Amino acid sequence: MWAMIAKEFHELQRDRRTVAMMIVLPVVLLVVFGYAANFKVHDIPVAAVGPGASQAAALLREPTFHVTDVDPAAGESAAQARLRDGQDVIAVVTGGGRPLVLMDGTQLFSVETAESALARLAPTAGTPAPRVRILYNPDLTTSWIMVPGLAGLILVFIGTLITSLGVVRERQAGTLEQLAVMPFRAWDVIAGKIAPYLMVAAVDLVFIVVIGMGVFHVPFVGNVAVFALGAALFLLVTLGMGIMVSTVSQNQGQAIQLAFMLVLPQVLLSGLIFPISSMAAGVRWISYVLPLTYFIQVSRGVMLKAAPISALAEPLALLAVLAVAVLGLAIIRFRRDLAPSSRTTQAAARTAERAAA
Amino acid sequence: MRYGLEEVRVTRGRNVALAGVTVAVDPSRIAVVVGGDGAGKSTCLQVLAGLLEPDAGTVRRPAKEHIGYVPATAGLYRDLTVQENLDFTAAAFGLSRGERDRKASQILEQTGLGRARRRLGSQLSGGMQRKLAVGLALLHSPELLILDEPTTGVDPVSRADLWRLISRAAVDGAAVAVTTTYVNEAARAASVVLLEAGKMLASGTPEQILHDVPGAVGAWPGADRPTSLSWRRGASWRVWSPAGRLPDGVRPVTPDFEDAVVVATLAAEAANQAGR
């Protein structure tokens, strides 16, 4: 038995990635769950508008609320626009009797926390109880906010995992070497390899959204083109991650391990489940480099809030930056695998000339 | 030399993979690179195919459109059928539909895979897979055919089939470079390069290599190993004497190709030890 144990440790020692996963993953999970997975919401961004804005803002105390704007001149429509554009989750509209509290129903946990905080606040403050209106998801239906996010998660799976497996399979089988000798340009191989996955993922996305609408009655109130733009940019990022994973993996097992390590943080840190504003600052920055974070903003914004493209310019621009960076880096790395062949073309030309001479 | 390597040197980190190797690959001729595992055979072909840039030396090869290459590992898509493999390769090399159909049926006939058209690559036997891989490399009638150990792990009947396919390509005008670990296969070649640890032990026609065997080779029927420079050959021993003086009782024989390869290896070892 000792021989068996010793052999197993020797093998494990050689498989550095598995060791890293055994040691690093629990630490990462602990940190992430400890700091990010927080159902107790705080720092809910709130705006106060109307003549009594300052008084209302004074009542909304930290840590539950975080007042981002006090504007006595603005009215209900401006407050609604702030919610639609994702600047705030709560807006208090004062003036004309009982204040009106608008809430962004796509932020489930934040709204629930805010509701109970307001209920505690009202009797003690001696002010008239506010009217509450929940926008975009009035019944606070979980599936309404989960479906747009899950659509993104499924795209991450296809884009990252399936793509990386497809490329690694080619490397493992030795056919990548053969492709490098065939008269393909590196770009032909890369585009030819990505395009099918892009198409399958696009079809998948349509299915998910249609099923979400049909079965879970999730609304789609926004512009389909904006949604499609966000999805296309997001897909390019995930495909880039897939190719990146494949360039550093020698076999499918390694690719699955790595892809898993890229997918897991996106599940926990993208705002799919836990609100980003409640995460500890040390963990929050990870959310801001994850593409799913921005896709969720776009998909929820378009599907539930009918947010116009101007309101989603920031997440769309960041997705575009990520797409260029990740896919660009992935293609450079992948080209290196096929690079000798591109050099060969020149070498061949030289040799052919020499042979002719 | 039309194609091939000239004084090619390849290093991998601190290891020398090829130390000044020359392999001439000429049209209508088969050049065989023979050597044991890790001798540098695959590296030779990777340099020739353009997959690896040498650190020094000259490589002559045609443009990619005129190269057919089968790596040691695969050479076909296991998840595609025989026909789909043929179609993909034909499309990759831009063959016209008519040309594709003509060449494909010719190759299916030559490889005996005509009845396996619809079978997946993974469902073919090892020998059939290698035959298909070589067939795919021949589909576009390449000027330079590069085959990395096409016969390794293949049964004797399929090996004979494969060699018929390879010889046919040479007859049709292709310059063929083949690696093998089977010494007897080298005797079929127009030229042979014998590699060991990245160094050329011998090169030339098989006849030249036989002619150039230094010293004398003899046979010893006894049970015990007669000298340190001896090796088993069937039931008896072969003995090599660098100085040409065989011990008493050892019957002189004319060395065959297998003897020549062993002698070249022993001579290199002796030279190495002398150099140290």
Image (tube, rainbow, N blue to C red):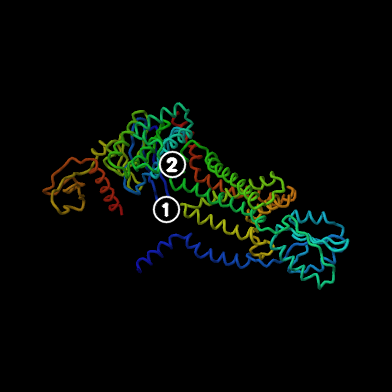
**To which residue does mark 2 refer?**
B77
The residue marked by circle 1 belongs to what chain?
B
| Amino acid at pointer 2 | Tyr
Give the mark nearer the N terminus: 2 vs 1. 1
Tell me: A23 left or right of B258: right
**Where does residue B103 sit, x and y in percent of width and height?**
41, 29
**To which residue does mark 1 refer?**
B14
| Amino acid at pointer 1 | Arg
Q: Residue at x 71, y 52 (%)?
A: A304
**Where does residue B21 sit, x and y in percent of width and height?**
37, 42
Camera-side mark, 2 or 1: 2
How crowded is the residue under tag 1: few (<14 C-alpha within 10 Å), some, or many (20+)? few
Question: Quadrant location of residue B68?
Answer: top left
Q: Residue at x 67, y 61 (%)?
A: A276
**Where does residue B234 sit, x and y in percent of width and height?**
18, 47
Question: Quadrant location of residue B101?
Answer: top left
